[in-house]
DNA sequence: AGAAATTCATTTGCATACAAACGATATTTC
DNA sequence: GAAATATCGTTTGTATGCAAATGAATTTCT
């Protein structure tokens, strides 16, 4: 017999736990970040640098898992700090092509230790095996 | 020798994966939710009902992992829909005590299947053992 | 070629989420 | 009992994040 009062336990729900886990990671990230980048801004800038081909704004957003509206705001803030610049696409007149600037590259290099530290801090309570397990499970989830 | 170009792989970072996993869960949640509640609103209302003692606004927020500013907005929206109501605390004149209404209770019961379905959908790709593993790992992370 | 559908970037509106500051009230400390 | 400290709820500002709509441009279909 299952106790009906305990059939749904909030603290056992994936969604609830995912929200709290990401929340904690964000706090650890922002604690360590010396370059004034949010997790999303960092991911976006990093993805732009590692891209093998030129990217439009929306294409970059998709690679980071953002919709167009969100991407617009993130790109605007990166532009305002001169971490990226845009060029008009000659072929498609709707499209901007995004490039990382030297400033952006140097900032990425400078904050990489912060970011790596925040990942380690987030996983600090897990053993090496458990960390791998968690990452694999999360990848399967997405 | 580690390839310096691959020393930091975005798609292997906890934070990045947590963000995408929660994003996917939210989408599945909102797809199924028939009662117009967000994940945060549902958690807040559910926590209020399961609470063993009267809760102030900030106390409820803490139980759901929200700061005071965020809690304010969530509580306002629940109040506007008459899902909760407030009473002034006699002892502490700064404090409101929150209570779930009958409407709120009925809504919780009505949407519980939606919410359970969204958790199952999120975990659908994992075996039963893997689901337990993931939940345990996430709890250790928080 | 022309119509239909898609994509690009943008805008608006709403809902978390945190930081920082605020006045009002309680509590603690001395 | 007065001062310092903490807590309660609130407000403002900033940053994701999604839905839905828009106009401009491109692609697809027939």
Image: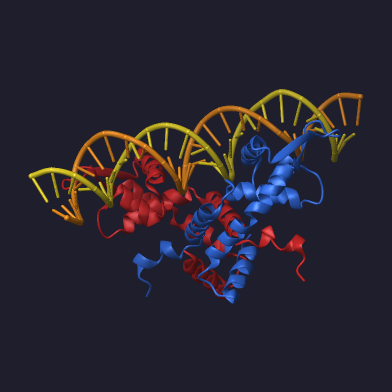
Chain colours: A red, B blue, C yellow, D orange
A127 is higher (above) or lower (below) than A86: below
B58 is higher (above) or lower (below) than D2: below
- Residue A61, given in percent of the width and then of the height, sits at 36, 51
- Image position of B28 (left or right of B102): left
Instruction: Tell which of B71 and B14 is nearer to you.
Output: B71
Image point 77% across, 51% down: which residue?
B51
Image point 63% across, 49% down: which residue?
B42
- Image position of B63 (left or right of A103): right
- Residue B14, given in percent of the width and then of the height, sits at 51, 62
Q: Quadrant of the C terminus of chain B?
A: bottom right
- Image position of C4 (left or right of D3): left
Image point 52% across, 61% down: which residue?
A119
- Image position of C13 (left or right of A51): right
Q: Quadrant of residue A3?
A: bottom right
Confirm whether residue A133 shows in the render: yes
Instruction: Tell which of B122 and A11 is nearer to you.
Output: B122
Q: Quadrant of the N terminus of chain B?
A: bottom left
Q: Quadrant of residue C24?
A: top right
Confirm whether residue B64 shows in the render: no
- Residue B16, given in percent of the width and then of the height, sits at 47, 58
Q: How many marks?
A: 0
- Residue A50, given in percent of the width and then of the height, sits at 33, 59
Instruction: Tell which of A105 and A122 is nearer to you.
Output: A122
């Amino acid at each position: 017999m299952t106790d009906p009062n305990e059939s749904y336990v909030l603290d056992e729900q994936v969604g609830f736990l995912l929200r709290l886990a990401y929340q904690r990671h964000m706090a650890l990230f922002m604690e360590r970040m010396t370059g004034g980048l949010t997790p999303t801004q960092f991911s976006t800038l990093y993805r732009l640098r590692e891209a093998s081909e030129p990217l439009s704004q929306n294409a970059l957003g998709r690679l980071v898992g953002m919709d167009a509206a969100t991407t617009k705001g993130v790109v605007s803030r990166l532009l305002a700090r001169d971490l990226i610049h845009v060029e008009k696409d000659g072929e498609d007149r709707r499209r901007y092509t995004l490039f990382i600037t030297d400033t952006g590259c140097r900032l990425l290099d400078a904050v990489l230790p912060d970011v790596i530290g925040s990942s380690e801090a987030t996983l600090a309570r897990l053993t090496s095996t458990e960390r791998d397990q968690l990452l694999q499970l999360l990848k399967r989830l997405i």
